[in-house]
Image (cartoon, grey):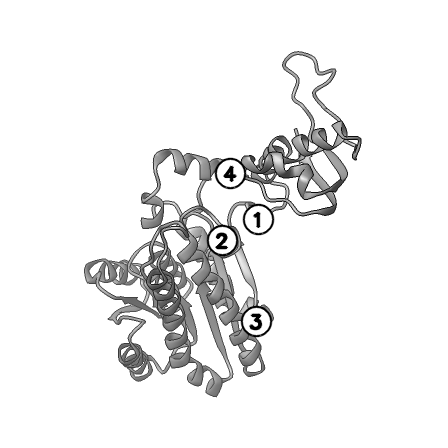
Amino acid sequence: MITGASRGIGAATALVLAGRGYRVVVNYRATAPQAEEVVATIAAAGGEAMAIQADVTVPDEVTAMVDQIDQLWGGVDVLVHNALTPYAITSFAELSWEELGGKLDSELRAAFLTTKAVAPGMISRGYGRLIYLSTGLSRRPRDGMITLGTAKAALDQFVRYIALELAPHGITANLVAPATVEGSRQTEQLTTEQQHELAAATPMRRFVRPDEVAKTVAFLAGEDSGFTTGHYLPVNGGLAMDLTRPARAHALAHHRTVARPVAGLLAARGRGSTGHTNPHHGLRAGARPKFVKYRIHWDVTVQDVAPLAGAGATYCAGRMTTSAWHA
């Protein structure tokens, strides 16, 4: 049973799982033509699928959907919870509790209701696969995405508790967290410049494709993942690595706006010591600078850094050490 399966990642997952021999339920809320198209594509390839309309935030509709599956196919062995409930794109300054609280409620309500509906049957059979679509935004914040990122972070922890409780029954529960997805409605809301920037920040220099997410889901749905539970699996082309270009760029920006002026200020007062090395010295024309590590130690007081408050940085009094990569 795949929620929100009429398009995007859900549709891609339906096609991949059907191709691997699963009977697939294509759940949708209001996009019947697209859902029926997915079913038709699966049938044309020799697979078996059916479309069921249900709003996964409405208890009676979720119950009716699972009851229908029980009657026709004997139950749900794999739940892929992909349905994305609406959310506001806004800053914290403009955010209302209704927007944040509403997203938290709908996100967890949908996951709770679908899991609650299928778990008893899985427990009785001693087998089950629960797979939930999260997002890299639950761990890596981005401007304007506070409602989605916060709600998905709550989902991440919910799934870990599910994994813990259901593991003795032969049921796994895992999260798949794609980065920005090619062709998704969310991606289409970004400007061309934003899309280029996000793609360039990924080591593979592009967005993830829906079928790549679907294949990760398929692994978790299969027999080979039987001892894999409670995991958060990023599908982001290497974006989660610690020393990607964005991390180095952030460190360089930090060095220019915070560490360098603080160190200079304290050195002028005879208060700081630095082990910073400038890698640009001695470079021939056209040569690429190396990335080197610097470490700065200083004793900081509020009076020392007060002149820098206008730079938008926040400081703490006391012994501090900055260690970062800088080009």
Earlier sequence position, callout 2 versus callout 3: 2
Is label 3 or label 4 in front? 4
* Mark found first going from the N terminus, 3 or 1: 3
Q: Are dots 3 and 4 in contact, CB under 8 Å?
A: no
Q: Where is residue 234? Give x, y as percent.
A: 53, 54
Q: Residue at x 25, y 66 (%)?
A: 29
**Residue 226 badge:** 3
Horizontal arrangement in the rendering, residue 286 relative to residue 170 (left or right):
right
Q: Residue at x 73, y 24 (%)?
A: 278
Q: CA distance from mark 4 to mark 1?
A: 11 Å
Q: Amino acid at mark 3?
A: Gly
Q: Which residue is mark 1?
A: 240
| Residue 248 seen by the camera | no
Residue marked by disc 4: 201
Residue visible at 46% across and 82% down? 122
Mark 2–mark 4 distance (CA, rounded to whole Å): 13 Å
Residue depth check, mark 2 versus mark 3: number of the one nearer the observer: 2
Q: Is residue 167 left or right of residue 114?
A: right
Name the element at disc 4.
Answer: loop
The single residue placed furthest to the front in the displayed view is 303
Evaluate if marks 2 and 3 touch, with contact meaning CB atoms under 8 Å apart: no
Amino acid type, label 2 = Gly
Between the residue at mark 2 and the residue at mark 3, the CA separation in whole angstroms equals 24 Å
Whether residue 298 is visible, yes or no, is: yes
Q: Position of residue 44 (x, y in %)?
A: 27, 59
Task: Residue 64 in the image: state x and y as whole percent.
Answer: 27, 81
Image quarter where the C terminus lies is top right
